[in-house]
Amino acid sequence: MKAFWFVFLTSLQNNFVYRANFFITHLRRLLAFLTPLFVWLSVFAHQTTVYHYSLNQLLTYIFGAMILQTLIFNSHTYELGSLINNGDLSLLLLKPISISLYFLSQDLADKALNAFMLLLEIGLLLLFIHLPFHLPSLGLVLVWFLPLFILASLLYFALGFLFGLVGFWSRDVWAPRFLFLVFLEFATGALFPLDMLPKTWQIWLPFTPFPYLLFYPLKLFLGQLERPFFYLAMAFFWLLVLALLDLFIWHRGMRRYEAEGR
Amino acid sequence: MKPKAVDFHLSQIYWRVWWRLAKLRFTEQIINTRFSGLFFIVGKITRLLFQVAFLYLLLRQVKLFAGYDFYQSLLILFLLNFLSSLIQMFFRGAYHFRFNLINGFFDFFLVTPLDELFYSLLSYFDPLDALLLPFSLGAVIWAWCRSGLAFNFANLFFFLFFLALALAFALAWHIVALALGLRFFVVDNFILLYRDLEKMVRFPLEIYSHFLRWLLTYVFSVAVLAPLPVAVLFGKRSPWPLLPILFFLAVFQLLLAWRFWRFSLRLYSSASS
C-alpha cells in the first residue's frame, strides 16, 4: 500500500509543476459554470417550470452535473493507450505493482485536489451569485448518494481503462476516446437532464451504463428517484460487467504486446 | 535578421511553403491516420447534432430564446461551428506549440529563413477541419435560408466583415497563446480557455448580464464569432458605431499581440534544446 501512497503523493505534486496551467484550468472551470446558468435563467425568465423541473431543481441539476463531471470524469487511464503504443507500459509491468491500482491512485490524487479546489470555486461563485438550490437530507446523501457516486467513479474508470486498451490493437487511441467523450456528454445527462428526452428513449436508458455516471446520482440527490436500491444494484452490475471485460481484453492484449518503441 | 513578409515575392514564398506543408499534412492524415480522422469527423458532427437537440428541446418549451426563434438560434450555433472549424484549420499549430517547445523543436523554426511565428502558428494545417468546412458552411446556409434572412448585398457585406474581424481577433488570441507559451508553457490551456469562451457564444448574447456581454464583445471579442453578426443581420443591434469600434479594436489587439510575441521571443532561453 505504501507504493500507492507515493504514487498518490507524486501525482498530487505533478499538478503543481506548471502553476500557470493549474491556475488557468481552474479559471476555465469557473467559466464552465456560467453558460448553463445563464441559459436556464433565460428560459425560466418567462415560466416557472420546464419539463417538470422548477428553477431550483434545474439549477441544482446543472451545478451538480458540473461538480460530478469534475470529480468523476477525470482519469489517468487516457494515458494507457499511449503507454502501450510507445512501449512505456513495460516500465510499469516491471514494477511490483498492480497497473489498475497505479492508475486508481493517480485518479484519487486528482479527485482529492479537484474536490478541494471545487470548494473554493463554488464558494467564490456563491459570493457573487445568490441562487436557490435544492438540498437533500444528510441521510439520503450518506446512505444512497455517496455509494452511487463511488460506483459512478469506478464505472468511469472501467470505461476509460477499456478505451485505453484499444492501444494494443491500434495506434489511434485518442480518436475513439474523443467520440466516446462526445457521446458520454449526451448519454450521461451532462448536457441536459435525460428525462427531457422523448419517452421512447427513456425506456432504454436504465439498461446502458451511461446514466449511472451522472443522471441517476443527480436524480437521487434531487430526491426524484424511487427504488434507489435498484439503481445502485444496476450500477454495480455494470461495474462488474466492465471490470470483467477489462480483464478479458487486458489478457488478450498482453498476448499481442511487443513493447514496440522501447 | 530575417526577411519581413512585405513584398509580393516574399508573400509568394510564404504561400508556397504553407501550401506544401498543408499538402503534406493531408497526405500524412490519409496514409497514417485514416480511421482516427473518420472518428474525429463523426465525433464533431455528432457533437453538433447533440447541441441542435439541446436547442430543439429548449425551444419546445419557450417560443423565443432571449428573443430568437429556433432557426435564428440555430444560425448562431452553425455560424460559430463554421468559424471555429475555420480557425482550427488554420491555427492548429498552436496546439502543438507546447510539444515543440518542450522537445526543443522550436529552435529549428528559429534557424529557418522564414518567420518563426509563421511556422509556429500556420505550419500545422488541419485537414480534418478542412473536410468538415463544406458541411459546416452548408449548415450555415441552410439555417440562413430557414430563418428568413435575405441574401442581399448589405447582409453579405456584414457577414463577410464580421468573418474577417473574427479571424483577426482569433489570430491575436492565438499569437498571445504562443507568446505565453514561450514564457510559461501554458499554450494548451490558454487555447482551451479561448475554446471555452467560444462555447459561451453559441447562444444569443442577450442571455448574459450586461457586464458579461461587454467582456465578451470588447475584451475577449468572441461575440464577433456568431451572436453579434446574427444580432446585426436580424436588426436586433445597430451596426453603427459597433463595426468601426470593433475594427479598431481588432487592429489594436493584433498589434499588441505581435509586440507581446516579440517581447517573449527576446526572453526565450532555448532551455529544452
Image (cartoon, coloured by chain):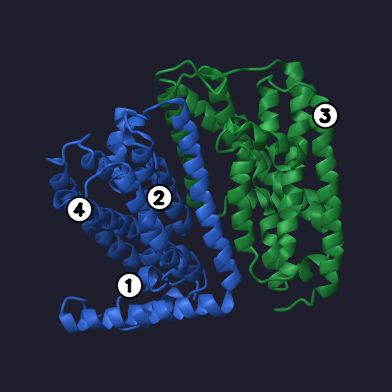
SS state under label 4: helix
Which numbered dot is residue B107?
Answer: none
**Do badges 3 and 1 share one subunit?**
no
Alpha carbon distance from label 1 to label 2:
20 Å
Residue B260 at x, y = what percent?
Answer: 29, 59
Q: Quick one: label 1 or label 2, which is nearer the N terminus?
A: 1
The vertical placement of B210 against B3, above or below, is above
Q: Position of residue A88 (x, y in %)?
A: 72, 70
**Display colour for chain A:** green
Which chain does tag 2 point to? B
Q: Would residue A139 be found to the left or right of residue A218 on screen?
A: right
Q: Which mark is residue A230?
A: 3
The disc placed on residue B194 is 2
Residue beneath disc 1? B118
Q: Is residue A72 above or below residue B262?
A: above
Q: Position of residue A164 (x, y in %)?
A: 71, 60
Q: Is residue B134 above or below residue B206?
A: below
Residue under pointer 4: B156
Q: Earlier in the sequence, mark 4 or mark 1?
A: 1
- Write down the quadrant of residue B160 in the picture: bottom left
